[in-house]
Amino acid sequence: MNFRVGQGYDVHQFAENRELWIGGIQIPFEKGLLGHSDADVLIHAICDALLGAAHLRDIGYHFPDNASEFKNIDSKILLKKTIKLIGEKGYVVGNIDSIICAQQPKLSPYIEQMEKCLADVIGIDVDQVSVKATTTEKLGFVGRKEGIAAYATVLIEKRNKNISFCI
């Protein structure tokens, strides 16, 4: 087996009159995140990590923020397309470990839903997806409640085709 590791990072600022989507689920909150798509900061970090691990550049290369077909798109669709891209190179997801940095809202009640949603979209066991949430102890733009950041680390595995040998 050939293993590769990738890391991803994304950040979006809060905006009025937007829904808040994180990890593929809608979180009830007074503000959403600003972005060309639904601005799902966690899925974007995961896509970047997966693409990087497979040496496929980054999310902006495949899904540019000036392309009309991606305007307000559900990021779960981008994640499915990313899984297809890495699959075309023979890779499958081994596991995902991620962290969401948000001073608000409190995300712990939604972690299990996010893990299940992500696992379902990717087509892996929920045990292969770890989502954690933290604050930044009121430091930086996250601490000032200006936005949310997310980090993701992924392990992907290249599946070798069965090779038959004739002697």
Image: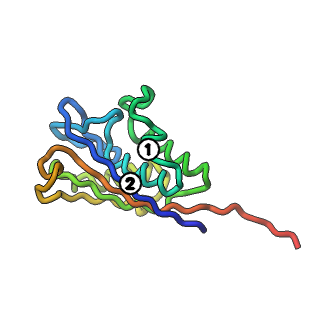
Which residue does the numbered mark 2 point to in the structure image?
Answer: 8
Disc 1: CA contacts within 10 A as few (<14), some (14-19) or many (>=20): many
Tell me the element at label 1. Answer: helix
For the residues marked 1 and 2, what is the alpha-carbon distance in whole angstroms? Answer: 10 Å
Q: Amino acid at mark 2?
A: Gly
Q: Amino acid at mark 1?
A: Ile
Provide residue 111's location: percent of width, then percent of height: 28, 55
Mark with earlier residue (1, 2) = 2
Confirm or deny contact between disc 1 and disc 2 (CB under 8 A): yes
Image vertical order of residue 5 relative to residue 107, above or below: below
Q: Quadrant of the C terminus?
A: bottom right
Front-lying residue, 116 or 146: 146
Provide residue 60's location: percent of width, then percent of height: 42, 41
Which residue does the numbered mark 1 point to in the structure image?
Answer: 59
Image vertical order of residue 103 relative to residue 80, above or below: below
Disc 2: CA contacts within 10 A as few (<14), some (14-19) or many (>=20): many
Q: Residue furthest bottom?
A: 167
Front-lying residue, 64 or 137: 64
Image vertical order of residue 101 relative to residue 66, above or below: below
5 lies left or right of 166? left
Provide residue 166's location: percent of width, then percent of height: 86, 69
